[in-house]
Image (spheres, grey):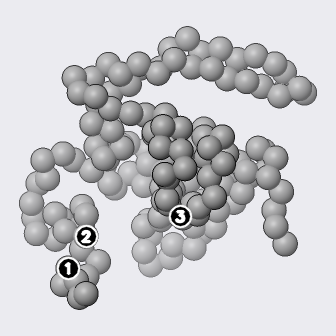
Amino acid sequence: MQYSEGIDVGYRWYDANHITPMFPFGFGLSYTQFRYSNLKVTGTSATGLAVEVTVSNTGRVAGTDVVQAIHEVGARLFNVHMKDLTNFQSKESQVPVGEGIMPVKKIFEALSAIKYKGFVDLEYEVHPDDPMPGAIASFAYMRGVLAGLGYAGQS
């Protein structure tokens, strides 16, 4: 099958055609808002920490937090594209993974909890003329998070 739009898919198609989408970039993460409360941290840095938080939907429509969604879909999760943003409403706010507001460690913890067997791909579209420094920083951060969770690197 031949696709005529080339790389202009998703939000890029709207940009290329000068169309304002019904929902701005980032709303695909959630169509609602959440409040986080009742943070509880137990344990020590020597024995390990456990963190609990209450997630409440405070918006006008039903929605799911990304970490909550991973737990809900479980084995049906097929593929994950990791991207980090400093602002969920702006596609221009992409930064190397670990420098934004995505809950990267919690995402990896959720993937581990559901025994995820798929891939976690890096989606990195910053500095197209020289993406390697940001891509390398992103992979280094993700490897560090995984090492912190007890996953040793494969050689």
Quadrant assignment, res 119: bottom right
For image coordinates 20% across by 79% down, the residue present is 5
Of residues 94 and 82, the one drawn nearer to the viewer in this rendering:
82
For image coordinates 25% across by 87% down, the residue present is 1
Query: Which amino acid type is shown beneath numbered disc 3?
Result: Leu
Residue beneath label 3, please?
Answer: 122
Q: Position of residue 56 (x, y in %)?
A: 41, 19
Residue 97, above or below 52: below
Question: Disc 1 versus disc 3: distance between alpha carbons?
Answer: 23 Å
Which numbered disc, 2 or 3, marks the residue that appears first in the sequence? 2
Report whether 125 appears left or right of 113. left
Residue 43, above or below 86: above
Disc sitting over residue 5 in the figure: 1
**Kind of element beneath mark 1:** loop
Query: Which amino acid type is shown beneath numbered disc 2?
Result: Val
Residue beneath label 2, please?
Answer: 9
Q: Residues within 10 Å of mark 2 (few under 14, many from 20)?
A: few
Q: Position of residue 95 (x, y in %)?
A: 48, 55
Q: Residues within 10 Å of mark 1 (few under 14, many from 20)?
A: few
